[in-house]
Image (cartoon, rainbow, N blue to C red):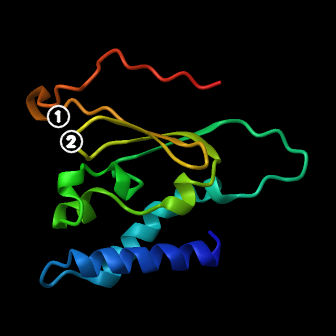
Amino acid sequence: MPVALIALAVRRMDRDIRRHAVAGADRLGEVARHLGVLAPLRHLRRVPKRGAVLRPLSSRTHHAPHPDCIAPAQRDTWNAGNSASDLSALTDSGRAALWVHGHVHHSLDLPRPGGTRLLCNPAGAGFANLAFDENRVIALP
């Protein structure tokens, strides 16, 4: 993983932890866990070799990869830091065609500037999400 990306992730994680700090939280442990989760996603930042044919990639994570995935009423709350990370460097790189995530309790279909489509379609506890679509299918080219 490029050092600049790690530094960016640490800065963002540090900011989120300070904003949503819980008394006694192990900040370094949280950063280490976060970086551990980011490691398998590093392929989204690789620059392809010249002339290489790129296949569309997809990614799936439990937590939302971008703060815009949080419902507006939940932004800037302690819950936002528990539900999403700011992985703009990955979501906006254009390498992934689709990023499916969970953890938030509402449906969303959000295109990012690089072309990555962020998608979440949770049923919710007791099928509480009325926007849940059991027939939703994503076709990648």
Callout 1 secondary element = loop
CA gap, disc 1 to disc 2?
Answer: 6 Å
Q: Indicate the quadrant where residue 2 lies.
A: bottom right
Amino acid marked by disc 1: Gly
In the depicted structure, whether residue 102 falls above or below residue 80:
above
Q: Earlier in the sequence, mark 1 or mark 2?
A: 2
The residue sitting at the right extreme is 51
> What is the x, y in percent for residue 122?
26, 33
Residue occupying the point 85% across, 53% down:
49
Of residues 131 and 81, the one drawn nearer to the viewer in this rendering: 131
Residue occupying the point 15% across, 78% down:
22
Quadrant containing the C terminus is: top right
Quadrant containing the N terminus is: bottom right
> What is the x, y in percent for residue 56?
66, 36
Q: Which residue is mark 1?
A: 124
**Relative to 88, is 115 on the left or the right?**
right
* Picture disc at residue 84: none
In the depicted structure, whether residue 7 falls above or below residue 141:
below
> What is the x, y in percent for residue 27?
29, 82
Of residues 78 and 2, the one drawn nearer to the viewer in this rendering: 78
Q: Indicate the quadrant where residue 52 lies.
A: top right
